[in-house]
Image (cartoon, helix red, strand yellow):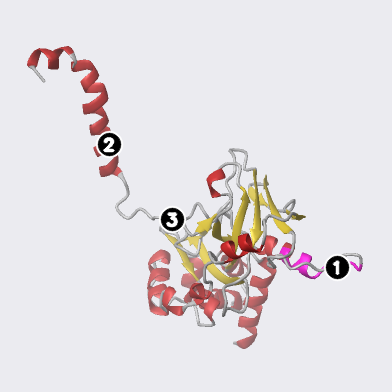
Amino acid sequence: MSFDNLRKNRFNYIINKTIAKLVDEANKVNAPANKYKADERYWKPTVDKAGNGYAEIRFLPQVDGEDLPWVRYWDHGFKGPNGQWYIEKSLTSIGQDDPVSEANSILWNSGVESDKAIARDRKRRLHYVSNIMVVSDPDNPANEGKVFLYMFGKKIFDKVMDIMQPSFQDEKPVNPYDLWEDSTFKIKIRQVEGYRNYDKSEFSKNDVFNDDSHREEIYNQVHALNELQDPANYKSYDELKAKLNKVLGIDNSPSVQQMAQLGESQTVAPTPEVVAPVTAEEFAATETDDDATLSYFAKLAATE
């Protein structure tokens, strides 16, 4: 480019090239160094600014060799007094001792109501994971017809159990994981008192498969679930204990008094939903299992 042309095209060049490049480079510099990359195997419904959302999915069976079409696990999510978050899967999910559960049992056993309140704030959060095929995703139609993993809470799992074990004689049991059952699940999300609510979600009679060839094609895409329960995918007790101590700002052997004094933790607003690392925002969609949690603490107290 000649000097005359450079001067003549200066304005367009600056706008279209130089500034755009500088902005792009600045964005790269300002991007978080350890930005978490979402696990693309997972799907979740989207909601609008009002907190409402809709999608339709089809639950799928487990791969050959696995016993159940879902896995269950617990995690903890809370903010310590120093502003740091503790967001980790609980080792109780795989039948091992977990430092947060142990700390909660100390608080619960103290008999002090303020200690129990802290234990409630740091309670385990229940999750289930199943394979699904997305039938309808209005906000992301490219997902339709594809197979994903879907993480959901107790509210949706209860609806799964209700259709498999109906309460009334005029209702026929349906296995929503059976490829030959005409059953899809309509996810209807509302924002109720600051939390995501799934009460209006329901199963619907809908045959989404063209034929057995289509069923086989979808089935061949399902993900193995057992790896989600593999101890190798959990942090060790010592790693979790070190993380907990750092978040709470205490030494390696906290007393009940220390736990109480430093226990002004902030619970994560229920969000949800990833077997992959979970962010604080995603906890806002996570449902909790209050009764099961309190029962768990009570059992721990009884063993002391």
Lateral position of residue 175 relative to residue 238, left or right: right
Residue with the mark numbered 1: 167
Answer above or below: position of 154 versus 281.
below
| Residue type highlighted by circle 1 | Ser
- Mark 2 residue element: helix
- Find residue 37 and report its horizontal and vertical position in percent: 39, 55
Q: Which region is colored magenta?
A: 160-169
Q: Are marks 1 and 2 in contact (CB under 8 Å)?
A: no
**Callout 2, which amino acid?**
Asp
- Left or right of 206 in this view: 88: left
In the displayed structure, would residue 30 be above or below residue 237? above
Viewer-proximal residue, 216 or 228? 216
Tag 3 or tag 2, which sits nearer the N-term?
2
In-front residue for pair 105/183 = 183
- Toward which corner of the image does residue 107 lie, by quadrant? bottom right
Q: Residue at x 43, y 55 (%)?
A: 38
Return the residue at label 3. Answer: 38
- Whether residue 164 is in magenta: the answer is yes
First in sequence: mark 1 vs mark 2: 2
Which residue of the protein is positioned furthest toward the left in this rendering?
3
The disc placed on residue 24 is 2
